[in-house]
Amino acid sequence: MQNEKLNTMEDIIICRDVHKWFGDFHVLRGVSVTIKRGEVVVICGPSGGGKSTFIRTINRLEEHQRGDIIVDGIELTSDLRNIHAVQREIGMVFQSFNLFPHLKAIDNVTLAPIWVRRWPKEKAVKVAMELLERVGIPEQAYKYPGQLSGGQQQRVAIARALAMQPKIMLFDEPTSALDPEMIKEVLDVMVELARSGITMIVVTHEMGFAKEVAHRIIFFADGNIVEQNTTEEFFINPREDRTKLFLSQILTH
């Protein structure tokens, strides 16, 4: 039923024949994909396949050299106004937490709304506390990142990304730097977020998370999409040999 509902929704991200080179290395080789508003998409695949580079092109952390990327009706070109307009609508959570170590958790969360959205400090603090509550760590608001566990730091990073009230959330292997016992606390926050209706693209090897919340799985290898399907079909009936091999390796661990 959820997928039927999505089929009637508009496209929020359109990528057509996207290419990216790092020097002579052709890292993205003609990626074409469309993401619908409110869709949760998991991208998986072997290391070095271009997954992280691809999602970084969507908010222009990496510049694509060929093809079209259109986010919420705005085409990503070299026009800085377009780039800034797109970046304001996208929140991103990285593998490393990228918090400012000299700022308390709450100040990390309020920084962008105050400076970019021009919110008064009172509003920014109020929203930040609500978000820290949402990610389950309101009591850590006035601690510095160095006083927090890895899982707590990543939850602050999620709150910080949400503080800009983005339409799209990108996650680049958000649990890969965490100790095993901290992974679940971050995934629980992401599950709640996925169910809230925000558009999400998540690069991850956490297949349990993918099965629970993703509408669609995209399998990347060698700089392009090898296979994509609904979550159920992807796991039950993978079509490509490369996908079958990947799943046999990852699901036995």
Image (tube, rainbow, N blue to C red):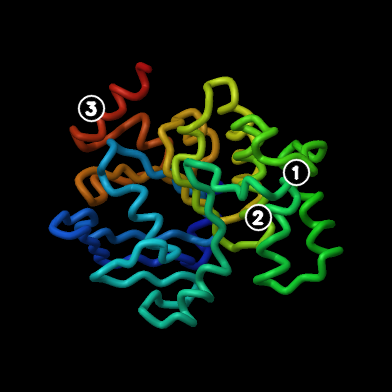
Residue 230 image-quadrant placement: top left
Report helix, strand or loop for mark 3: helix
| First reached walking from the N terminus: tag 3 or tag 1 | 1
Residue 131, visible in the rendered structure: yes
Which amino acid type is shown beneath numbered disc 3? Leu
What is the spatial separation of the Cα atoms under label 3 and label 2, in whole angstroms?
36 Å
Given residues 233 and 147, the one toward you in this image is 147
Q: Is residue 138 above or below residue 25?
A: above
Q: Residue at x 28, y 34 (%)?
A: 238
Give the labeled residue for mark 1.
134
Q: In the image shown, does 96 or 20 lie closer to the viewer?
A: 96
Quarter of the rendering occupied by the C terminus: top left
User: Vertically, is 98 above or below 8?
Assistant: above
Foreground disc of the pair 3, 1 = 1
**Classed neighbour count for the residue bearing mark 2: other residues with Cα under 10 Å, few (<14), some (14–19), many (≥20):** many
Asked if disc 1 and disc 2 are in contact, CB closer than 8 Å, the reply is yes
Residue 85: percent from the left, percent from the top? 53, 76
Numbered badge on residue 245? 3
Position of 126 with respect to 90 (left or right) is right
